[in-house]
Image: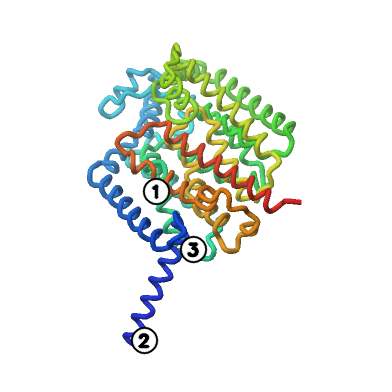
Amino acid sequence: MLTLDQTILKIKTFFINFLKQSSAIFNITSVNIINNFFLLLFAYMLFTLIFNQISNSSFITAHILSWDAYVYMCGVSLFLNGLDPYDYIVLRDCLPDNWNFYFNMPSTVLYLYLPFAKLTNFQWLFIINAINFFLLISVFSKLIKKFNYNGKIIPFLFVYLFFVFNTFDGAITVAIYSGNMGLPIALIALNLIIDYIEGKNKRFLYFIVIATLLKPIYICFCGAILLKEARFKDFLLITLYIILSVLSLYGLLYLIDPVNFHGFINNTSYLTNSIDLGFGFISLSREIMDYLNLYYENMSILSLIGSALCIVHIFAIFFITKKLKSSTLEKIILVALATMLFFPRIKVYDSLFVIPIISYLPFYFYSIFNSEDSAFKSKMSNTVYILRERIHLIILILIIYPLFIYNRWEPYHFTFIILISLYLFIYTLTIKNKSTYKE
């Protein structure tokens, strides 16, 4: 049994080591005591912001309405009763408090949800959220096994999950409680793309076809093929097969149910002109054009501009990174971030495709530029002192950035977070290639 003096010495040693490790991570300056001071100040501000957000907002209670799930439920109910689920007025009368929503999904969604038609609202939502939680646990378990946490699994998980739940201002909470099918699609896609990049199977390619039949926007997952396949010819052939498969199945859907197909097309046009742009290159284009006082006739024109920028950007990433060597985990990070930006209009539930990745980046950058066992740290020059050794702090600020602007949040901030994360990652890969693979 330890004596009092030994106990005090052990506690003192623990705190000294803890402060040293904290100084090494929060390395704003080269002086440890100054780093610790800034760390305490930062921690105080962070927890103040978190508790202020909790006490002054009804964030949790405001997002448990499961509004998207109700749209599916009402759409199926109207369909079974011989009514038109694509009729805006009829759907609104079915929704709680006459919510102002359109049913803008193809009739495949109606058929998908038919087995749940006889369930109560509670039973329906319980099943949907049970599926969501299962997928969350599954994909996070799969990813965490691939992460490098240097044997310190408990502190890693604690900090990592803290980042996860703060990235994108609680996007996971919103996505889960909205009941939108985009959340399970994003999680399944991330799960399958890992196997696809590792070369285990090509189920991800078949999944693109299935997901696109539920929402046409998911054809954008084809961007991952461009960054994964070694030959450009393979990308073209695979993408062509997917597009032809999707068009053929939509043609079959039109032949089977032409009335609802026309309703889907009409409501999709409303979505195109919707002022709810989510985040992505469309919302970013609007901010830039408004700032430059450039006139655009309608939202369709803006959507066209944003979509064109997405195509240009994904090909730019392809040419920038095609000669860079990377590990499997690095390839997963690159493909996930770039693919998400290939979506011109990103919704909060789609962001589950990249939140687990972005939340890991502080650990990745720290291990690359600061870890003692880094394979190429000694080969780097110290000319870019602030950027290289502190990229993990830049990403940390990006992750908790929404806390600082909670009351004036705009969608394009999401886009900047993904863009900055992606290009810092590409920069790191470039430095690593020069240092590790230098001839």
Distance between the alpha carbons at the discs numbered 2 and 3: 28 Å
Q: Residue at x 68, y 27 (%)?
A: 240
- Residue 299 seen in this snapshot: yes
* Residue annotated with mark 3: 153
Question: Hey, which residue is sitting farthest right in the picture?
Answer: 439
Which residue position is annotated with label 2? 2
Question: For the point 44% across and 31% down, which residue is it?
Answer: 279
Mark in the foreground, 2 or 3:
2
Residue 133 at what x, y percent from top left? Answer: 43, 48
Check disc 2: other Cα within 10 Å, few if <14, some if 14-19, many if 20+: few
Circle 2/circle 3 CB separation < 8 Å: no
Location of residue 118 with respect to 373 vertically, above or below:
above
Name the residue type under label 1: Phe
Q: Which mark is residue 165?
A: 1
Label 1 or label 3, whichever comes before in sequence order: 3
Q: Secondary structure at mark 3?
A: helix
Relative image position of residue 313 (x, y in whole percent): 59, 30
Give above or below for 288 relative to 335. Answer: above
